[in-house]
Amino acid sequence: MVPIRARADRLFDFTCCLRPFRASGPRLDTERLGDTLVVHNYGHGGSGWSLSWGSSTLAVQKAMAASPKEVAVLGCGALGLTSAILAQKAGASVTIYAKDQLPQTRSARATGSWTPDSRIALTDAAGPAFGDLWEQMARISFKTYRQFLGLPGTPVEWIDTYMLADDGPDVVRAHYQALNTLGFAEYRDRISDLTPRREILPPGATPFPTPYVSRASNMMFNLADYGHTLMSDFYAAGGKFVQTEFHSPSDLTRLKEKLVINCPGYGGRALWKDESLIPVRGQISWLIPQPELTYGLFYKDVSIVPRRDGIVVQAVEGGDLKGFKDDREVADRAEGEAAVAVIAGLYARMAAAPKV
Ligand SMILES: Cc1cc2nc3c(=O)[nH]c(=O)nc-3n(C[C@H](O)[C@H](O)[C@H](O)COP(=O)(O)OP(=O)(O)OC[C@H]3O[C@@H](n4cnc5c(N)ncnc54)[C@H](O)[C@@H]3O)c2cc1C
């Protein structure tokens, strides 16, 4: 297996962004402002890319119920772009209005993994009905991502991820459950038929030195290419982009379109004075890509995702509470260097392990 060249001097970028978390799950209701109908589609926590096609399908169904010829989409991140493309497919002429577009939006700074129930809600606050809605969104999204596999540029692909541990699976599970003191919702079992089960590998089956190694196959989004593909699809279907900033909801009533799909992400907190939106800070440190590296890793609270546009290195100690209510959107180089040192330690341990 190709080793990761885990060296601090190979870190070429550090990015940071805020996950738009709402305890009750994303805001998906509709609201009338004068003669403008607003369909909300924001607050997808750490699952915005994964749920985007499903959530936007539901938003577009509501929007198109009135058969508008023209649709405005506020926002050009994961949710805005998928809403815009689906509204075009439903026959509308679409203009995106946003302060910035990919790759400047927060969405571009995500890990890029299929994580449909990552920080999506708190179980109690969301209630049982949200689980059904979540499942519907996750299933639609999963099926839609199928269409992006095998395309030039590899916008989406499947990878293997190895979880390496010195403790057995029960101990590791108990550790992460103990960290979930707020009760972040876990809905994954509802869609366990979609993805292969994690396999526990026998000792010696891999070169990794830890006593416990398991492997899972997961979908990965190469966001540089995938974002470019979405932008190109939107423009190819006649989409228009207007760079603008809205300062209050009433600004939307001045648009010529009377139907607005509202996808501001964390920007919804200021624009809609929505204090239920909680920031969850997340940082990525980027190692120079290694095209020959095709697997991901999870070792000692560091996660590695082998994207084509850079190897994603993330420190994830603290579980879902890491970064909770932290709105400092600045990257910390020391955090990235410490995470890389952990991975360097893994390969040093492998090199030192007796050969069998
Ligand atoms: C470190 C990290 C890792 C993540 N990893 C994953 C992952 O692996 N998988 C996954 O599914 N999700 C992941 N996420 C979550 C995902 O990135 C978000 O849920 C998603 O990006 C939200 O997309 P969005 O379109 O709602 O918001 P954004 O990308 O923030 O887009 C909002 C848009 O609205 C515009 N806007 C906002 N306010 C205004 C305003 N007042 N006027 C005009 N325009 C405005 C912005 O300019 C932008 O165009 C991660 C998040 C982080 C921080």
Image: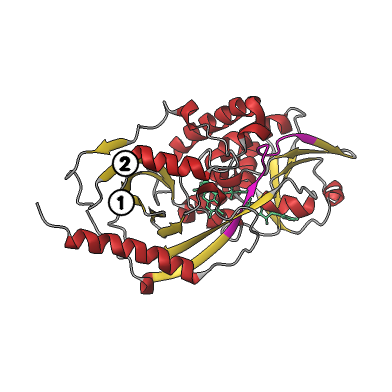
Kindly identify the residue that appears in the image at 45 percent across and 58 percent down. 315
Residue lying at 52% horizontally and 38% vertically, measured from the top left: 116
The span shown in magenta is 17-30
Dot 1 or dot 2: first in sequence order is 2
Residue 328: percent from left, percent from top: 63, 64
Q: Which of the labelled discs sits on residue 56, or is there none?
A: none
Q: Residues within 10 Å of mark 1 (few under 14, many from 20)?
A: some
- Name the front one of labels 1 and 2: 2
Amino acid type, mark 1: Thr
Q: Residue at x 88, y 38 (%)?
A: 35
Residue extending furthest bottom?
9
**Residue 84 seen in the current view:** yes
Residue linked to disc 2? 168
Mark 2 surroundings: few (<14), some (14-19) or many (≥20) residues within 10 A:
few
Q: Amino acid at mark 2?
A: Gly
Q: Is residue 298 above or below residue 178?
A: below
Colouring rule applied to residues: secondary structure
The residues bearing labels 1 and 2 have C-alpha atoms spaced at a distance of 25 Å
Instruction: Return the x and y of residue 273 as percentages of the image width and height.
Output: 80, 50
Read off the residue under disc 1.
294
At x 73% / y 40%, what residue is drawn?
A: 40
Q: Secondary structure at mark 2?
A: loop
Q: At numbered mark 1, what does the secondary structure look like: helix, strand or loop? A: loop
Q: Nearer the viewer, residue 236 or 168?
A: 168
- Residue 271 image offset from top left, x and y in percent: 78, 52
Q: State the residue lying farthest toward the right.
A: 34
Q: Is residue 289 visible?
A: no
Q: Eyeballing the image, is 128 above or below 180?
A: above
Query: In the image shown, does 208 or 31 lie closer to the viewer?
Result: 208
Q: Residue 346 at what x, y percent from top left?
A: 28, 59
From this view, report whether residue 338 is shown above or below residue 245.
Answer: below
Looking at the picture, does residue 64 appear above or below residue 299? above
